[in-house]
Image (cartoon, helix red, strand yellow):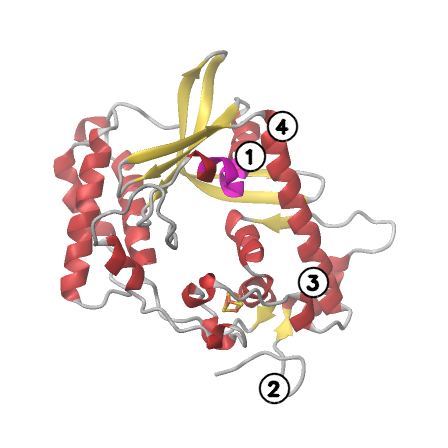
Amino acid sequence: MRRPTSSGNRTPRSRAASQPEQLGFEGMPERLFVCTPSKLGAYADCPRRYRYTYVDRPTPPRGPAWAHNSLGASVHTALRNWYGLAADRRRPEALPMLLKGTWVRDGYRDDEQERAAYRRALDWLEAYVDSLDPADEPVGVERVVAAKTSVLAFNGRADRIDSRPGPDGPQLVIVDYKTGRTGLDADDARGSQALALYAYAAERVFRRPCRRVELHHLPTATVAAYDHTPESINRQVGRAEDAARDIVAAEKAVAAGSDPDEAFPTTPGTLCGWCDFRASCPAGVQTPAKEPWAAVERTLLPPPPLDGQEQREDR
Ligand code: SF4
């Protein structure tokens, strides 16, 4: 097992250190920080995890695949392919074929657990498509949207972008599917930087207002929504820019010879048990490892009340 440290074991070469040209030259504009919601989220969760994922090369070894990620990916792809069907074929009978065709098998404890997860996912999908109008054609399904500010170049893949009537004409709505065990509320939708950035980018890509963001939680068949204002979206964009500046400063510090462990500190906490790099991280190794199927095991239990405070294993 390799553990990056500032002394002793050899520290992996960082991408920042190997690309000094990214620092720019005096008098020349700085490059925009290219980012996705995952990239910003990784830094917000833990700067060290960001470094392991995006800076260190070679990338430290990741732990095994998580069953909850397999479940989330399977459901997401089945819903993408649902919209790939002609409207007259979007019927519940199509779902088993769609789910089987996209099923990801990694991470489950055994065949029995995997079968139980498949049946549960099919139940979620049947209930969910029952709430959809098969004739509705979203503006985008797993659609990449991108936008630039003076600091960052954002791109991300929105699960779905709807067009719905608004008070001043058609408006876009960002839809994000969730498959974690715990229900979500309007605060989750309001606080999601990813959703706000999708809305910011979609408005510019499609040149139509996009203020509403929705989390569609399939296990509880609930929708958590928030109607942003231009100001609240700008606040989220500003926070993303602040994070981008912090990341660039840390990468520059490493390129200039600073200790990478100090530039990208660990933030030990409950997330460590679920971190792909736990075994490579000096803080993470002190946290008991979660079994790859632990979250799915809980997902298969009856759902908790909406205000449950459990770990959210969402994709
Ligand atoms: S194990 Fe914890 S402290 Fe270490 S990188 Fe992962 S989240 Fe950060």
Vertical order, 242 against 185 (above or below): below
Marks 3, 4: nearer the viewer: 4
Which of pointers 3 and 1 lies earlier in the amino acid sequence? 1
Q: What is the number of the mark on residue 201?
A: 1
Q: What is the number of the mark on residue 251?
A: 3
Which of pointers 1 and 4 lies earlier in the amino acid sequence? 1
For this rendering, which residue is in front, 88 or 260?
260
| Amino acid carrying mark 3 in the image | Glu
Q: Mark 2 points at which residue?
A: 9
Residue 61 can be seen in this image: no
Which span of residues is magenta-colored?
A: 189-197
Q: Give how far across and how far down residue 78 sits, in percent.
A: 26, 44
Q: What is the number of the mark on residue 136?
A: none
Task: Tell me the crowding category of disc 4: few under 14, some 14 to 19, or many 20 or more residues within 10 angstroms, Cα based.
Answer: few
Q: Give how far across and how far down residue 156 sits, in percent.
A: 50, 44
| Amino acid carrying mark 4 in the image | Glu
Vertical order, 253 against 227 (above or below): below
For this rendering, which residue is in front, 135 or 171?
171
For this rendering, which residue is in front, 128 or 101?
128
In the picture, measured across the screen, residue 29 lies left or right of residue 156, that is right
Gap in Å between the C-alphas at discs 3 and 4?
30 Å
Q: Do the residues labelled 3 and 1 touch (CB within 8 Å)?
A: no
Q: Is residue 298 magenta?
A: no
Q: Give how far across and how far down residue 283 sits, in percent.
A: 53, 73
Which of pointers 4 and 2 lies earlier in the amino acid sequence? 2
Q: What is the number of the mark on residue 231?
A: 4
Q: Determine which quarter of the picture holds residue 64.
A: bottom left
In the picture, measured across the screen, residue 138 lies left or right of residue 197, that is left
Residue shown at 33% from the left, 47% from the top = 182
Gap in Å between the C-alphas at discs 4 and 2?
48 Å
